[in-house]
Each structure stands twice: as structure tokens, then as C-alpha cells.
Image (cartoon, coloured by chain):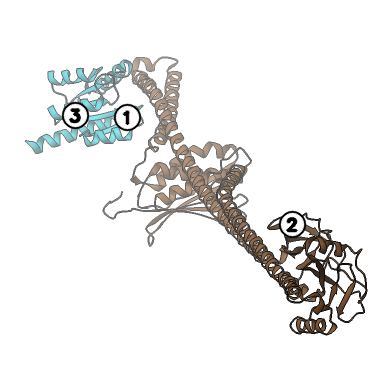
């Protein structure tokens, strides 16, 4: 498997989950960075570019949807996949309306998540081409 | 519940009746009383006037008789009248105008009847010791009581004294009572009226209709002489009579007129019966009106209470489900996060197991099997939490495209365990390519859940529940048909099963609200729910949901 040419930022307050997911993504040749909160995610994005953000909706401090809004204003080309552990489809739907690429219900299998990340990256490439 | 309405009904009736009947009675009674009093006064005044009038006539009569004798006595000398022809002439003259003179006689100072004109041989009789003779000597004029005398015919005498120089004599006339009896009788009225004269010894002086013949004692108390007239109420025989009495001026007799109040008061009695009839009619109308109004009010109250109970039940059910939904969502969320960690860790172990050096380990197969099991059971737990979330999500009232087949499948997962325990087969026959319906999935799910649950309860054990979906193109309705192999619904109950509080379940195990809520939900969503019995027995429920309310929404 070739090393995919894209970078993924994983945002989740659950440290165990974050660490393991990042490690498993890296094992699949995805360059992944994990941050424990929304503020840190924005800082990371400001530091260096990411292609796809996997974002937990429910987090202490900055809420996932707020983070999504901030990302979409500042880096409109970055694709976001929402992770929801909560009942609310409408937070998922709302997220979609705010420009998220997709949403995934926790707990999810990596085999389900990975194709979505790849699709998101493809769409990002497509949109970059059309905007340029 | 019924008792509460009964009490209220009684209270309302009692207050309405007392507020309307009491014034009615007061007005009726006081009017009647006023009328009665006025009329009684009038009857009494009439009687008084009658008595006074008769008294006047009788007084005049006696006055005239006395005056006549007095005139005769003073226009003739003793010697003249002692001549038989002169006396007979005077008597004839008097009788020519007044037939009631029986005889006329002249009595000298020694009491000898010296001259007499009349039908009897009374000349020569001596009256010196008679009571009347002494009285006339004393008073100048004398009127006797009525007596029957030797002829057994009621009459009385009038005697006047004439002084002529130093001697005196008496002119005496006997008079029939016929005339003044008829004058007295003129005052008697009605069927039971009576009029008569009594003397100072309370003996009848004229014949009466009911209380006796002359010289007998009437059944009225003796009245000592009084001035003016007097009214009394006396019990005579079996009747209560109104009695008017007055003493005559010229003779010591009392005129008594009796009237039957029953006759006199006939108008009052008629008025009373009319008033009673009117009162009874009024009471009947008031009672009927009160009953009618109260029934109307109670009916409306009951209806309102029933509506409220329905609404409350609906509201309670909704809020119960909402609370349950929130609870389920909270639990699912709390479980999902650890589940996610477990999933990732197991995935990490699986990743590591793929490395070569580990694959050589003797327990490699065991590790791999264990990790796979962990993943499987995380999946299982995830199914539960996601189902809970799906359930919670549907508590929010929305209008979304609903895939009816998916909804049915999802709903059935709630009931599959229960059905399996009772060995009930749930079979599905879902039509492909049905359009989505624009509706409230949560509410639809509640209805389906309820109906399928009822079907499972009806089958009880070892049977089948069949669910079929179908799209009706003409109606643009999606139909869900749920049939079971239970006992079916007795035909007489078919039109009652959607009524609130109707239940066939054991007391305490069902609220009887399930199907009525289903019915109201389906109606709200523009759909229908119908029940019938299947051809092979068992109940069939058909839900129909309109595909959409507005044409602009495309579904898929």
C-alpha cells in the first residue's frame, strides 16, 4: 500500500480513543495527528495544513459544531467528518448543513471510517481543482 | 366518577329549584292572602250593610204601626171609639191598606175590653192583671213579643195609652207577623242563608229556615243589647256560618242574618284552586326546566372531562415517551464512548496480531479468536445503543421522509425477543420500491409498535404475526397490514376498540389507551387505522399513511 499523500487531524477528548485511533491510522500509512480539544485543533490547523479532520461533536470546552464552523470559515477546503456518540441525528444533520462531509456514529469500525476519510480527501482534491 | 356527577347534579338541582321555587311560593301565597283578605272584608261589609238596611226597614215598619195607632188614639175620643160602628169603621179603614191588622180593641183604665173589632169574641175580657197592661200604663206604648195565642198563629200586639182629661184608656191592635217576616226573609240569600228575629229571651220571633219555628230557641248565644251591628262566625249544625246581628230600635228584638261563607267565598275558593293549578303548572315547568338545564350542563361537563382525560392521557403518554427517550439517549451516549475505546483497543490488538513475530506464538489462534469475539460483542452492544438512540431520536416531533419498510424492520427488532420467547413467528412481506412517506417516523413507530405488541399479546403463544406493506397508487397511501393468528375481535366490539379506556386485557395490565392514541396519532398524520377480522380468523389491523401532504416535497 502506498503511503497516501494526505494528513488527518483527529479531535476527541477521550485520550484512550484518540491515541489508539491515531496509532491505527498511522499503521495504515495515514499521517494522523491527535489533539484532545477544539482549541488545540484550531491551533494545529493554524500551524500546518491538514486535509481531513475527524471531529467529535461532543467535547468539553469548545463544542464540535463550533469547531466545525470555525474550520469552515477559516479553511473552507478542509473536509470534516463528524463523530457522534450522541442520539442527535440533527446534530449530524446540522453538521452536514454546516459543511461537514459526513458523520459517523460511535463506536465505529475503522473499516467503516477509513473509506469515508479517503472519500473526503478525494472530494477535497476535486474541489481544490475546480476552485483553482 | 359517576357519583361525582350525581352529587353535582343534586346540588345544582337543589339550588336552582330553591332559588326559583321559593320566590314563586312567596309571591303566590302573598297574592292569594291579599286577595283572600280583601274579599273577606268585602263579604263582611256586605253583610253588615244588609243587616243595617233590614234593621232600618223593620224599624220603619214598627214606627209606622205605632204611629198609626197613636194617631187613631189621639184623633178619637174614648166615647167615639166605644161606639161599635166607629171602631169597626176605623178598623176597616186600617185593614183596607194593611191586611195584617187582625183586630182592634179599646180597653178602659180598669182593664175591661170595652170595644172590639175583629174576628174573635174578645169583648168584655179583663186585662187588669196582664203583664202588658201594666207595661202600657207605665210606658205609654207597648209592643209585645210574638206569641201563638189561642189560634196557634204567630202574632203580636201593639198597645198605646191615651190620656183624655183625667181618665185614660188603651187602644190595642193585634198584628200578623206575615208582613215583617217577609221583610226579614228578604235578607236571606243563597242555599244555606237564613234570617230571623229573636227577642231578649233569645226566642225566635219569626220562622227560620234551618234553626227552628217561632218561640223556639235558636242555636246562637244570647246577645245582650248592643249598639250598631255585630259580625260573628258561628258553627251551626255542620256548617260554619257568617252571622250578622243588630238590635232593632223600636222593639226589643234582634235581627240575625246568617250566610254560608262557602257560598259567599266561592270566588275566593275558585281563585284558590286556579292559583293552585297555576302554581302546580309553574312548579312543573320550573322543575322540568331545571332538570333539563342541569342535564345539559352535566352532559357538557362530562363531555369536557372526557375530552380532557383523553388529552391528558395523550399528553402523559407523549411526555412519558419523551422522558424515556432522553433517558435512553443519555445511557446510549455514556455507553458509546467506552464502547468506542474498547473497539479501538481491540482493533489495535488485531493490528498488532498481524505482525509476523506474534503469529508464531503458540497462543496466536486463541488471541485472534478472543479479539474477534470482543469485536463481535462490541458490535452487539453497539446495535443496542444505536437502537436506543433511534428510539430516542423519534421522540422529537418532526416531518421527515420515512421509509416505511425500514421503520417496520427497526420496530420489529424491539419485539423480536419477546416473540421468540413465546414461540411466535414474525413474518414480513414488504413491497419493494415504495415511496417514502413524509410524516413523523417516531409517532408512526409508536403506532406500529403498539399494534404489533397487541397482536403478540393476542396470539399469546405458538402462532404467527404477519406484517405486509403495500403502496396504493390511487390513494397515494402506504399501507401497513398487521395480521395475527389470535382469536380475533368479537364483531360487536369492532367499532369500540378505538374508544378511550376500552380494553380486553386483564384489569391492571392495560390502560385501554393504546389503540385510542394510535387512532388519534393516525388521524393527526392524515392517515387511518382500521380493524377487521381476517378470513381465517385472527385480527387484521391496517394502517394507511398518506405519502405526503404537499406535492413539492420529493422523497427518496
Chain letter for mark 1: A
Measure how far apart labels 1 and 3 are at the Cα level: 27 Å
Q: Is residue B71 visible?
A: yes
Q: Are marks 1 and 2 on the same chain?
A: no
Which picture quadrant has residue B271? bottom right
Residue topped by disc 2: B233
Circle 1/circle 2 CB separation < 8 Å? no
Residues at marks 3 and 2, common chain? no
Between the residue at mark 1 and the residue at mark 2, the CA separation in whole angstroms equals 123 Å
Counting from the top left corner in percent of width and height, residue A47 is at 13, 18
Q: Earlier in the sequence, mark 1 or mark 3?
A: 3
Q: Give whichever of B372, B150 is nearer the camera.
A: B150
Q: How far from the left and from the top, in percent, is residue B481?
A: 49, 52
Residue nearest the viewer, comparing A21 with B424:
B424
> Which shade is chain A?
cyan
Q: Nearer the viewer, residue B181 or A115?
A: B181
Q: Which chain identifier belongs to the brown chain?
A: B
Amino acid at each position: 500500500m502506498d503511503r497516501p499523500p494526505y494528513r488527518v487531524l483527529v479531535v476527541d477528548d477521550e485520550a484512550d480513543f484518540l491515541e489508539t485511533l491515531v496509532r491505527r491510522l498511522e499503521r495504515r500509512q495515514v499521517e494522523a495527528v491527535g489533539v484532545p480539544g477544539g482549541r488545540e485543533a484550531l491551533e494545529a490547523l493554524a500551524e500546518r495544513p491538514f486535509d481531513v479532520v475527524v471531529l467529535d461533536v461532543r467535547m468539553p470546552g469548545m463544542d464540535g459544531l463550533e469547531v466545525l464552523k470555525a474550520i469552515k470559515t477559516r479553511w473552507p477546503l478542509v473536509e470534516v467528518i463528524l463523530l457522534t456518540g450522541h442520539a442527535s441525528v440533527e446534530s449530524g444533520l446540522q453538521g452536514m448543513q454546516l459543511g461537514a462531509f459526513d458523520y459517523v456514529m460511535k463506536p465505529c469500525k475503522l473499516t467503516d471510517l477509513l473509506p469515508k476519510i479517503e472519500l473526503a480527501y478525494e472530494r477535497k482534491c476535486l474541489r481544490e481543482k475546480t476552485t483553482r | 366518577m359517576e357519583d361525582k356527577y350525581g352529587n353535582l347534579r343534586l346540588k345544582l338541582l337543589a339550588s336552582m329549584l330553591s332559588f326559583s321555587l321559593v320566590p314563586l311560593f312567596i309571591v303566590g301565597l302573598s297574592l292569594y292572602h291579599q286577595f283572600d283578605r280583601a274579599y273577606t272584608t268585602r263579604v263582611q261589609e256586605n253583610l253588615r250593610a244588609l243587616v243595617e238596611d233590614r234593621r232600618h226597614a223593620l224599624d220603619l215598619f214598627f214606627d209606622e204601626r205605632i204611629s198609626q195607632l197613636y194617631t187613631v188614639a189621639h184623633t178619637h175620643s174614648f166615647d167615639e171609639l166605644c161606639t161599635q160602628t166607629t171602631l169597626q169603621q176605623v178598623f176597616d179603614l186600617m185593614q183596607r191598606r194593611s191586611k195584617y191588622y187582625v183586630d182592634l180593641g179599646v180597653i178602659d183604665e180598669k182593664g175591661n175590653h170595652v170595644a172590639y173589632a175583629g174576628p174573635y169574641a174578645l169583648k168584655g175580657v179583663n186585662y187588669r192583671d196582664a203583664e202588658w197592661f201594666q207595661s202600657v200604663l207605665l210606658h205609654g206604648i207597648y209592643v209585645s213579643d210574638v206569641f201563638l195565642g189561642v189560634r196557634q198563629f204567630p202574632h203580636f200586639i201593639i198597645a198605646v195609652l191615651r190620656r183624655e182629661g183625667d181618665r185614660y184608656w188603651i187602644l190595642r191592635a193585634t198584628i200578623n207577623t206575615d208582613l215583617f217576616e217577609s221583610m226579614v226573609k228578604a235578607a236571606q240569600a243563597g242555599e244555606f242563608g237564613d234570617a230571623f228575629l229573636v227577642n231578649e229571651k233569645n226566642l225566635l220571633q219569626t220562622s227560620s229556615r234551618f234553626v227552628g219555628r217561632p218561640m223556639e230557641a235558636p242555636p246562637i248565644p244570647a246577645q245582650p243589647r248592643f249598639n250598631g251591628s255585630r259580625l260573628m262566625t258561628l258553627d251551626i249544625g255542620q256548617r260554619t256560618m257568617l252571622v250578622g246581628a243588630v238590635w232593632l230600635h223600636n222593639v226589643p228584638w234582634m235581627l240575625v242574618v246568617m250566610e254560608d261563607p262557602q257560598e259567599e267565598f266561592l270566588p275566593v275558593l275558585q281563585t284558590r284552586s286556579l292559583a293552585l293549578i297555576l302554581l302546580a303548572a309553574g312548579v312543573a315547568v320550573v322543575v322540568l326546566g331545571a332538570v333539563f338545564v342541569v342535564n345539559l350542563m352535566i352532559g357538557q361537563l362530562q363531555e369536557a372531562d372526557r375530552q380532557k382525560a383523553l388529552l391528558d392521557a395523550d399528553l402523559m403518554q407523549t411526555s412519558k415517551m419523551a422522558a424515556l427517550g432522553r433517558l435512553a439517549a443519555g445511557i446510549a451516549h455514556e455507553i458509546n464512548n467506552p464502547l468506542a475505546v474498547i473497539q479501538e483497543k481491540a482493533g489495535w490488538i488485531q493490528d498488532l496480531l498481524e505482525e509476523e513475530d506474534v503469529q508464531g506464538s503458540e497462543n496466536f489462534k486463541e488471541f485472534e479468536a478472543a479479539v474477534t469475539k470482543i469485536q463481535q460483542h462490541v458490535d452487539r452492544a453497539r446495535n443496542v445503543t444505536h437502537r436506543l438512540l433511534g428510539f430516542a431520536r423519534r421522540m422529537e416531533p418532526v416531518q421527515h421522509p420515512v421509509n416505511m419498510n425500514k421503520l417496520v424492520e427497526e420496530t420489529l427488532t424491539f419485539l423480536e425477543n419477546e416473540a421468540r420467547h413465546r414461540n411466535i413467528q414474525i413474518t414480513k412481506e414488504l413491497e419493494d420500491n415504495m415511496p417514502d412517506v413524509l410524516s413523523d417516523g417516531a409517532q408512526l413507530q409508536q403506532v406500529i409498535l403498539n399494534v404489533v405488541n397487541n397482536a403478540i399479546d393476542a396470539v399469546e403463544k405458538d402462532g404467527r404475526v404477519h406484517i405486509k406493506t403495500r403502496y396504493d397508487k390511487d390513494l397515494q397511501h402506504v399501507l401497513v397490514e398487521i395480521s395475527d393468528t389470535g382469536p380475533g375481535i368479537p364483531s360487536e366490539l369492532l367499532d369500540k376498540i378505538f374508544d378511550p379506556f376500552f380494553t380486553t386485557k386483564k384489569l391492571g395490565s392495560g390502560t385501554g389507551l393504546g389503540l385510542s392514541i394510535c387512532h388519534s396519532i393516525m388521524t393527526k398524520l392524515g392517515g387511518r387505522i382500521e380493524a377487521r377480522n381476517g378470513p381465517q380468523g385472527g385480527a387484521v389491523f391496517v394502517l394507511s399513511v398518506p405519502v405526503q401532504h404537499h406535492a413539492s416535497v420529493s422523497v427518496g
